Image (tube, rainbow, N blue to C red):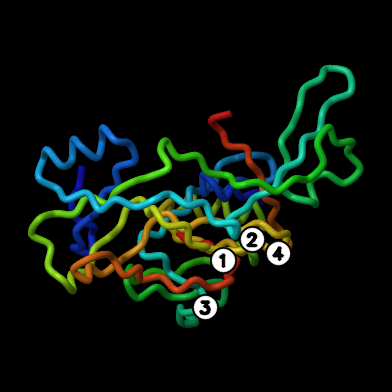
């Protein structure tokens, strides 16, 4: 997948839009508690699980977002399945 | 335009030109004026690859994206933000009391939000702050995290 740190938009490697990341609470992943859901951590403000995108393929993540477009995601700029891009779908 | 966050915090707006600042003053806000000082810690990099026949270019920001590609401009770090004036102002409501926690929508100060292991450091745009009677105490601990959530 690809992430644009300026627009905060996440794309698949084929430049299909996944989500624009926005957390008004500036939640820090390190401070979130582990959950039974092994691929995420729990945000007690929104009472939702934040999904770790490092553990998903583009296809699985796209499907997950289709099922629930409001799913919160975590991206680590250093994760192996991510490259940084300056492109967005507006270009 | 909402004046409060879903959490109920008042949103403090930022004016970034003389006209915007004076318009806000006319509306009753106290503009807390500050210089806009780019931090050398905030930086991004880019490289330009160019098609040898068509001349079309592509901007690349990730070392891994350019392997084997000829570059018209090699990776170069730069300050990636542009602001309309070298000053800006937080628009303070006249009834704010010391101790009130607010949401600053557009931070004037340069604070590092996250760092990438390729050397790029990204700017915090918004955060909570507490009014101390004179200025805002920013409620964000600058840490060298590379995580983004949302």
Residue placed under numbered mark 3 in the picture: A30
How far apart marks 3 and 2 lie (CA) works out to 14 Å
* Parent chain of label 2: A
The answer to whether the residues at label 3 and label 4 have Cβ atoms under 8 Å apart is: no
Q: Residue at x 38, y 54 (%)?
A: B107
Q: Is residue A51 left or right of residue B117?
A: left
- Report x, y in % for residue A75: 58, 61
The answer to whether the residues at label 1 and label 2 have Cβ atoms under 8 Å apart is: yes
Q: Residue at x 42, y 57 (%)?
A: B109
Q: Residue at x 41, y 70 (%)?
A: B140
Q: Residue at x 64, y 50 (%)?
A: B44
Q: Residue furthest top?
A: B54
- Report x, y in % for residue B5: 23, 57
How far apart marks 3 and 4 lie (CA) works out to 17 Å
Numbered disc 4: secondary structure: loop
How far apart marks 1 and 2 lie (CA) works out to 6 Å
Residue placed under numbered mark 4 in the picture: B117
- Please tell me whether mark 3 or mark 4 is closer to you in this view: 4
Q: Is residue B93 left or right of residue B47?
A: left
Numbered disc 1: secondary structure: strand
Can you tell which quarter of the image residue B131 is in? Answer: bottom left
Depth order, front residue of B98/B32: B32
Residue placed under numbered mark 2 in the picture: A77
- Please tell me whether mark 4 or mark 2 is closer to you in this view: 4
- Report x, y in % for residue B69: 88, 38
How far apart marks 1 and 3 lie (CA) works out to 9 Å
How far apart marks 4 and 2 lie (CA) works out to 8 Å
Q: Is residue B1 left or right of residue B106?
A: left
Depth order, front residue of A82/A26: A26
């Amino acid at each position: 997948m690809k992430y644009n740190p300026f627009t905060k938009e996440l794309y698949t490697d084929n430049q299909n839009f996944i989500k624009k990341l926005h957390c008004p609470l500036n939640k820090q992943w390190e401070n979130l508690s582990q959950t039974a859901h092994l691929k995420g951590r729990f945000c007690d403000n929104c009472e939702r699980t934040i999904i770790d995108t490092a553990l998903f393929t583009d296809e699985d993540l796209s499907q997950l977002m289709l099922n629930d477009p409001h799913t919160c995601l975590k991206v680590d700029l250093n994760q192996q399945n991510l490259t940084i891009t300056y492109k967005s779908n507006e270009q | 335009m909402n004046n409060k966050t879903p959490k109920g915090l008042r949103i403090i707006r930022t004016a970034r030109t003389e006209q915007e600042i004076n318009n806000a003053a006319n509306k009753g806000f106290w503009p807390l004026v500050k210089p806009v000082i780019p931090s050398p810690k905030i930086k991004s990099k880019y490289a330009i690859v160019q098609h040898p026949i068509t001349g079309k270019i592509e901007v690349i920001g990730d070392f891994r994206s350019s392997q084997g590609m000829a570059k018209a401009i090699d990776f170069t770090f730069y300050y990636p933000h542009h602001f309309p004036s070298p000053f800006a102002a937080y628009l303070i409501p006249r009834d704010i009391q010391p101790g009130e926690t607010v949401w600053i929508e557009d931070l004037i100060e340069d604070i590092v939000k996250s760092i990438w292991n390729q050397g790029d450091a990204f700017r915090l745009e918004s955060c909570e702050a507490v009014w101390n009677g004179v200025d805002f105490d920013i409620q964000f601990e600058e840490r060298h995290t590379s995580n983004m959530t949302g």
